Image (cartoon, rainbow, N blue to C red):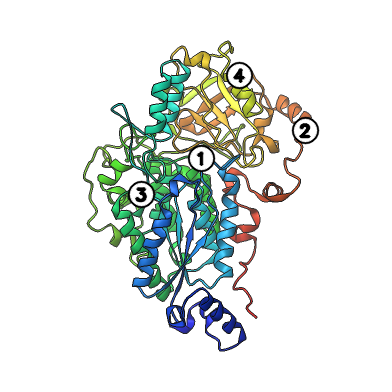
């Protein structure tokens, strides 16, 4: 690409009044013409905020990227983007993923950016940024935030999320003192960076890495490691080269790339949230990826990353020392399409040359997997005709085939009050059910799916039971939890017809989830069902509720998917 073909030349190159205005404003910002004219303008989209601990290092990483862009002859500009942090954004960060995607697309489209570096990592920032950049269509490279360091307390290694749930159950059982609880609270998150378990953050950055949208293995580098700074600077250098090469996401994001990403996700013990985001990203790229495709890949892809919560012993820092994602992909190289192109301008196979495993208990060989099938299984049945998801490796195998009476709750407060009641009439065979917690019912598809074990059972030593909901759950969670039931109960899906006492049957080997209620009774209940009052009458929630798709379609907005219509194209400049 020649300098006059740069996208930014539309703003700066013509010798007319409009370019005079653009150049004069750049001079107002303190830049001389020779600093930016004829050079690739690189947007650094930064999802930092003072409430996003996962991205606490991003101000420094912006400077690292800037250094790389300048070294390669580009002109860097930082562009703030919505910081959808997982911890503080309520009612759920998922309510705002599509807002970030829209903002990302429009930031890129409306400004003189020739290429972008996307800084994300905390759960919804990765898919949100990537979805928007796919549609915008300029060269892009993703810079993952990186996992935080291992947690520690009293000689124990702690994993964020997973150990929070574990020790909370022990506290509810009376086995953890106030002093111990405070120590765990302070020791479980010791540095900047995302959850260091294979939760949604590490899952989604690994997927983006496997798609070919990051520098090779970038997703595995801990946030606090000096290698993360060097990687950020390299992102800056490489994006300038990508602009000159005109290497755009549409060239990289082929069906083969998404097949690779899905297989790698299964092999890592990925978060159940991977299903929703992968499908949404694929649909933005015009690739047909469905629940059935993912289930088929899951049946043939062994789980080889021994990282919590699907693995038993290790965390992301250990995974990095063992060789990281490049080593894992090298182990399963024969299963991947190594001809797939990546942001390096080279193939996946070329990027994997020289990768090796340094600890084969952390990254297992295919012959000795943590779990013979992949991380996720997709279910269908009369409770979930459009699908549901479960994480078999992270639950007690005795629940893989289970039949028991339902205990149904219509809201989280109702469920929470019941499970905290030590006199609740419940047995380990019961099936806890929460509905009205999906994309519309939540609202926003909150992470409520790991329903707490009732105190009445906790006190007796039980730590798992079958739970079903139309909600999501944190990727750091575990247990016999069936999630993403579609259609959701709030819109009249079959889950809305289930009653306490109905028998529910899970048959994981045959991928079935059913309520054992005859069709005539279900028809009677369906005729009696009444739609709830709309949750929103204005604002973002109003827009969300009218355009979000169901879980099996990725929860994107219908009008943002590629098949809806033509992209907006370049803005008019007059």
Q: Is residue 364 left or right of residue 547?
A: left
Q: Nearer the viewer, mark 1 or mark 4?
A: 1
Q: Between marks 2 and 1, how big is the CA–CA gap?
A: 34 Å
User: Disc 1 designates what residue?
Assistant: 87
Please report whichever mark, 1 or 3, sits nearer to the chain's N-terminal start.
1
Please report whichever mark, 2 or 1, sits nearer to the chain's N-terminal start.
1
Q: Which mark is residue 418?
A: 4
Q: At which x and y percent is residue 542?
A: 71, 48
Local crowd size for mark 3, using a 10 Å CA cut-off: few (<14), some (14–19), many (≥20): many
Q: Which mark is residue 530?
A: 2
**As rendered, which of 551 and 526 lies closer to the eye?**
551
Q: At which x and y percent is residue 314?
A: 31, 36
Q: In percent of the image, x 38 and y 27: which residue is there?
A: 183
Q: Between marks 1 and 3, how big is the CA–CA gap?
A: 18 Å
In the rendered structure, are the residues bearing label 1 and label 3 in contact, judged by CB atoms less than 8 Å apart? no
Please report whichever mark, 1 or 4, sits nearer to the chain's N-terminal start.
1
Q: Nearer the viewer, mark 2 or mark 4?
A: 4
354 in relation to 471, above or below:
below
Please report whichever mark, 3 or 2, sits nearer to the chain's N-terminal start.
3
Local crowd size for mark 1, using a 10 Å CA cut-off: few (<14), some (14–19), many (≥20): few
Q: Nearer the viewer, mark 2 or mark 1?
A: 1
User: Disc 3 designates what residue?
Assistant: 223
Give the quarter of the figure containing the C terminus: bottom right
Q: Nearer the viewer, mark 4 or mark 3?
A: 3
In the rendered structure, are the residues bearing label 2 and label 1 in contact, judged by CB atoms less than 8 Å apart? no
């Amino acid at each position: 690409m020649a300098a006059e073909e740069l996208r930014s030349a539309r703003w700066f190159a013509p010798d007319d009044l409009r370019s005079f205005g653009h150049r004069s404003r750049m001079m107002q910002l303190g830049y001389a013409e020779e600093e930016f004219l004829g050079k690739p303008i690189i947007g650094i989209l930064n999802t930092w905020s003072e409430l996003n601990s996962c991205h606490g290092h991003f101000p420094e990483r912006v400077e690292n990227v800037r250094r790389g862009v300048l070294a390669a002859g580009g002109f860097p500009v930082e562009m703030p983007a919505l910081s959808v942090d997982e911890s503080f954004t309520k009612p759920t960060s998922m309510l705002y993923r599509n807002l970030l995607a829209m903002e990302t697309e429009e930031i890129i489209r409306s400004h003189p950016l020739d290429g972008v570096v996307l800084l994300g990592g905390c759960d919804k920032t990765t898919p949100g940024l990537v979805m928007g950049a796919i549609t915008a269509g300029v060269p892009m490279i993703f810079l993952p935030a990186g996992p935080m360091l291992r947690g520690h307390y009293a000689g124990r290694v702690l994993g964020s999320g997973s150990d929070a749930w574990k020790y909370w159950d022990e506290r509810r059982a009376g086995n953890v003192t106030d002093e111990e609880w405070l120590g765990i609270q302070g020791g479980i998150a010791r540095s900047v960076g995302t959850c260091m378990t294979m939760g949604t953050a590490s899952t989604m950055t690994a997927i983006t890495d496997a798609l070919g949208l990051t520098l090779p293995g970038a997703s595995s580098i801990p946030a606090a490691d000096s290698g993360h700074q060097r990687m950020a600077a390299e992102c800056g250098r490489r994006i300038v080269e990508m602009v000159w090469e005109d290497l755009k996401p549409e060239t990289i994001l082929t069906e083969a790339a998404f097949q690779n990403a899905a297989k790698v996700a299964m092999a890592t013990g990925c978060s159940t949230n991977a299903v929703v985001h992968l499908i949404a990203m694929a649909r933005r790229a015009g690739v047909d990826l469905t629940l059935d495709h993912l289930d088929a890949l899951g049946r043939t892809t062994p789980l080889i990353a021994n990282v919590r919560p699907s693995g038993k012993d290790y965390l992301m820092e250990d995974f990095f020392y063992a060789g990281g994602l490049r080593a894992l992909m090298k182990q399963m190289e024969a299963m991947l399409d190594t001809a797939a192109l990546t942001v390096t301008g080279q193939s996946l196979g070329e990027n994997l040359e020289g990768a090796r495993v340094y600890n084969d208990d952390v990254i297992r060989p295919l012959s000795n997997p943590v779990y013979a099938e992949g991380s996720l299984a997709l279910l269908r049945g009369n409770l979930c005709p459009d699908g549901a998801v479960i994480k078999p490796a992270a639950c007690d195998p005795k629940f893989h085939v289970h039949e028991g009476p339902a205990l149904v709750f219509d809201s989280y407060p109702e469920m929470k009050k019941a499970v905290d009641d030590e006199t609740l009439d419940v047995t380990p065979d019961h099936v806890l059910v929460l509905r009205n917690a999906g994309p519309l019912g939540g609202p926003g598809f909150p992470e409520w799916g790991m329903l707490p074990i009732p105190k009445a059972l906790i006190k007796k030593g039980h730590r798992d039971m079958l739970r079903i909901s139309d909600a999501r759950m944190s990727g750091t969670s575990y247990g016999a939890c069936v999630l993403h039931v579609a259609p959701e109960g709030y819109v009249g899906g079959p889950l809305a017809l289930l009653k306490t006492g109905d028998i529910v049957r899970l048959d994981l080997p045959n991928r079935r989830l059913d309520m054992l209620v005859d069709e005539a009774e279900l028809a009677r209940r369906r005729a009696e069902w009444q739609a709830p009052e709309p949750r929103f009458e204005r604002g973002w929630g109003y827009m969300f509720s009218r355009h979000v798709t169901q879980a099996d379609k990725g929860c994107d907005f219908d009008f943002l998917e590629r098949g809806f219509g033509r992209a907006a194209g370049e803005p008019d400049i007059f």
